[in-house]
Amino acid sequence: MTRIDLQLNKIQGNKLALGAGFVALDIIEGREQRFAAAGGSCGNVMAILSWLGWNSAPISRLGQDAAHEFIVDEFNSIGVKLDYLLSDSSVSTPIVIQKFAESKDGVRSHRFSLACPDCRGWLPRFRPMTIKQAAPLLESNLKPKCFYFDRVTPSALRLASWVKERGALIMFEPASVNDERSFQRAVDLCHILKYSDERLGHLKDLEETQHPKVIIKTQGEDGLAMRWQNRWSNLEAFDAPLFEDAAGSGDWCSAGILHTLGGKGVDIFNDINKSDLERAIRLGQGLAALNCGFEGARGMMEFMDIKTVNKALRSLTKSERSLDWSIDGKEHRVFPKQLCDLCVEPKSRTNKSVEAA
């Protein structure tokens, strides 16, 4: 494979990125302590884009609770726009617990739990924004350059259609299929379809669908496969120079691709070639590899600045195993000691628990 030198630069100009879907409070059972962070695929991608200079805004429905306040506080500190982060007293803010396991040979892996580790009650789940709640945005004159969505809901489909009419580049990153008809509509609306082979690889029709201009099938440690102009090619994964946690790697890859390609909106496809596309994807893969050195889906944002990231990217592309770049440590945001107050109402609790892969 031809070496591609990677360079991460902040976006120039006042570029708007919108994202609809999963925003949650992540509680990470870390190696040294339990800590919290704003998360969810949509939340992470929008936060990363804001860190890269975008005017980014998640579109999601959260509760009026402490978890929502924590997410808002963190997004504010990053510069994420909160105009379309709905606070609704009829729902609770989604919460996800991230746990770790270590194999006999020292390989660390993560898993997600949807049950409170203190009381074993169900934690709040994702509740989609309604079309009525999304109406003010749909009636606005905004012209986003790119749009990301990770859940198939009536409001997300309406928003995707709306931004497509305004010339936005659309990425759809599904984790599952519920309603096949709505799912196909989402696939038809997007320009970039990105999905995990582990989760959706059994849907062979996805590889043949014709509406997306680019299809990206991630394959974990084996890298990813990319379809461009009906031809498939493979891009190997970078070796992570440090490894603590692979959670969030896919979100960094998605954000890196959107950051590189999204500034021109859908017009990027007027003159893009395969080399340009591969460079965007390789940047996403590089960011994903670097973030594996930190606990939490966006740990790298807390410990590295863009200058240091670029130094680390150069090490990746030169296949250097020595780390000649330093990391500035920061304190994690700890919240809370007990999680029971964030669970669903006591009358709805059960003694059962659920684990999500």
Image: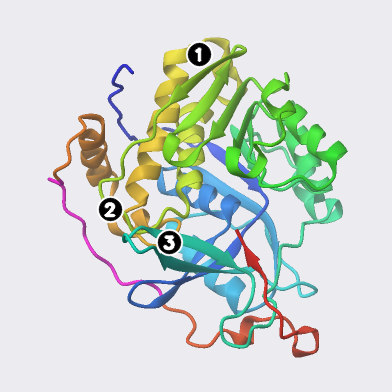
Could you tell which of marks 3 and 2 lies nearer the N-terminus?
A: 3
Callout 2–callout 1 Cβ contact below 8 Å: no
What residue range appears in magenta?
323-333
Q: Is the residue under label 1 in contact with that under label 3 (CB below 8 Å)? A: no
Whole-percent x, y for residue 262 in the image: 53, 30
Q: Is label 3 or label 2 in front?
A: 3
Q: Residues within 10 Å of mark 2 (few under 14, many from 20)?
A: many
Q: Is residue 118 magenta?
A: no
For residue 59, side relative to residue 334 (left or right): right
Q: Residue at x 31, y 16 (%)?
A: 2
Q: Nearer the viewer, residue 50 or 93?
A: 93
Count up the numbered dots.
3
- Check disc 3 and report the residue beneath it: 296
Q: Amino acid at mark 3?
A: Gly
Q: Earlier in the sequence, mark 2 or mark 1?
A: 1
Q: Position of residue 167 (x, y in %)?
A: 67, 25
**Residue type, numbered disc 2:** Met
Give x and y (percent) for residue 293: 31, 54
Q: According to the image, label 2 marks what residue?
A: 304
- For the C terminus, the quadrant is bottom right
Which is nearer the eye, 159 or 179?
179
- Along the line of sight, the residue nearer the viewer: 297 or 19: 297
Residue at the spot of label 1: 272
In the rendered structure, which disc, 3 or 1, sits on the residue that comes first in sequence? 1
Front disc: 3 or 1: 3
Residue type of the residue flagged with mark 1: Ile
Dividing the picture into quadrants, the one containing residue 95 is: bottom right
